[in-house]
Image (cartoon, grey):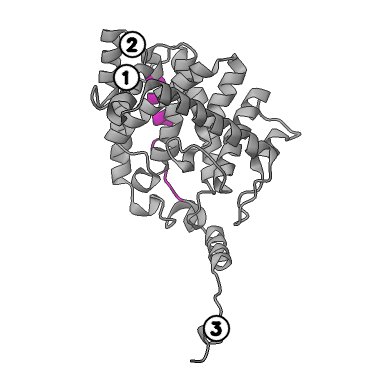
Amino acid sequence: MSLLFNDFKSWEKHCAETGEPLYQPVLEYEVEQKGRTEEFIWENIAKAYEVMKDAVQTGLTEDMTSRSGMVNNSAKKVAKSPVTVLSPEFQMLVSRALGAKEVNSCMGRVVAAPTAGASGILPGTLTTLQELHGLEDRKIHEGLLVAAGIALIIEQNASLAGAVGGCQAETGSAAAMAAGAIVYCLGGNVEQVFTAVAITIQCMLGLVCDPVAGLVEVPCIVRNASAAAIAYSSSQLAIAGVNAVIPVDQCVAALGEVGESMERKYKETALGGLANTPRAREIEKFVLVQDVEILPDEDENSEGV
């Protein structure tokens, strides 16, 4: 896609001039930059989406307990909660995002979209969207290409990594990708797609990356759920015609600026924020002791010569 443009404005201009759908330039990028055939790309997008769906199902049906104990079947608890704060559809969205992310934290198979730490957001949002609206797989696959294009532009102008730009760059980017894909899949125009991206970034701006004990578990998993919810609310605002006011490219620039100015301790170092609370430090000590492998004394294993 860098052959064509480096920002959303250029992407929109290109599609307006050529009449191509939003996903087409991203497809061309894969073909030209990586030497792949269109058939190969579509087949692998389909495989990726199957992995996403499998992760959602695994998270909702199998035991999701991590070695640290911080992950303990949250998705199933939300899905089966007898007290429902949310509508059934919203409850489904949250539980699916939690489930897919818990699979990652329990060393299961996921799609890093764009990162493993944000791997519950696109699976949770897109599987729910498909079920609610009866969408064909092909439309979801196109939406995934649109999401990939969004990620490429954010990566060029800001960051997708928590270690570089905080959680705003990781779950924030994933939520922006999801929001854009949702609006695209529901027939929104290019302006509405990019408005959804802009609003999502505005909602996620400034979020720090502060993993407890350095593990991608707390607060990462619950942030996947909340980011999925933000993606949906941003999509609704955009497709209803709400104005983001700040253009999407300027929102991305703000994401990069905030990430650059963020203190290092808030960038995946486990030195600040929630990771620096007394309880988090207790968990950290437990995890470190648990993971130490006690080797037998060297003298006991040595043989006389």
Q: What range of the chain is rendered magenta?
A: 194-210
Magenta includes 208? yes
Label drawn at residue 20: 2
Q: Earlier in the sequence, mark 1 or mark 2?
A: 2
Between 110 and 271, the one nearer to me in the picture: 110
- Residue 301 is labelled as 3
> Residue, x 54% and y 19% (percent of image)?
137
Kindly report the distance in space between the C-alpha atoms of the residues bearing marks 1 and 3. 62 Å
Residue 21 position in % (x across, y down): 37, 12
Per the image, the residue denoted by label 1 is 25
Q: Amino acid at mark 1?
A: Pro
Q: Is residue 27 left or right of residue 184?
A: left
- The majority secondary structure of the magenta stretch comes to helix
Amino acid type at mark 3:
Asn
Badge 2 amino acid: Glu
* Mark 1 Cα-neighbour bin, 10 Å: few <14, some 14–19, many ≥20: many
| Sequence order check, earlier mark of 3 and 2 | 2
> Circle 2 sits in a helix, a strand or a loop, which is it?
loop
Task: Mark 2: give few (<14), some (14-19) or many (20+) Cα within 10 Å.
Answer: few
The quadrant of the picture occupied by the N terminus is: top left
Q: Mark 3 touching mark 2, by CB under 8 A?
A: no
Tell me if residue 263 comes above or below residue 204 in the rendering.
Answer: below
Element on which disc 1 rests: helix
